[in-house]
Amino acid sequence: MTEYDVPSRWILHLPTTLTSVDGARALAEALRGSLGHVTAIDFGETTLSEEDRQFVRTRVWCDQRLPGGGRCALPADHPGGSCRADRCSP
């Protein structure tokens, strides 16, 4: 492997019986709250999609890179244009 080779990451698609985007978002937030300590899960990249329209995805969290290497954990549609470390926390 060279310095340019990056191992492929795997995506876990977790179907639910939920019937609303708000319910799916709430479940994603609960999973992040209870499993946030598991470093193998990249919650910042969480997206939602309807069962039969999986190619149309809705981002859950902003996930914009912050100074110092962290990422914004606020909702994807939070107001404010640019993220700052002092206001980007769950």
Image: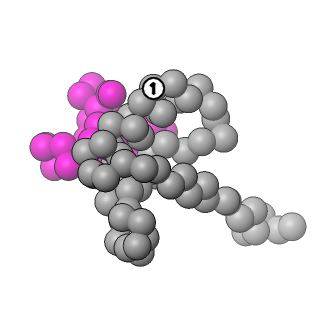
- The image quadrant that residue 68 belongs to is top left
At 32% from the left edge and 60% from the top edge, which residue is drawn?
A: 58
Residue range corresponding to the magenta coloring: 61-90
Rendered location of residue 71, percent (x, y): 41, 40
- Position of the C terminus, as image quadrant, is top left
- The image quadrant that residue 44 belongs to is top left
- Position of the N terminus, as image quadrant, is bottom right
- Report the residue that reaches farthest toward the left: 79
Q: Is residue 63 left or right of residue 9?
A: left
Q: Nearer the viewer, residue 84 or 54?
A: 54
Rendered location of residue 23, percent (x, y): 30, 42
- Give the residue type at disc 1: Gly
- Position of 36 relative to 71 (above/below): above
At 63% from the left edge and 31% from the top edge, which residue is drawn?
A: 38
At 45% from the left edge and 26% from the top edge, which residue is drawn?
A: 33
Magenta-drawn stretch contains 40: no
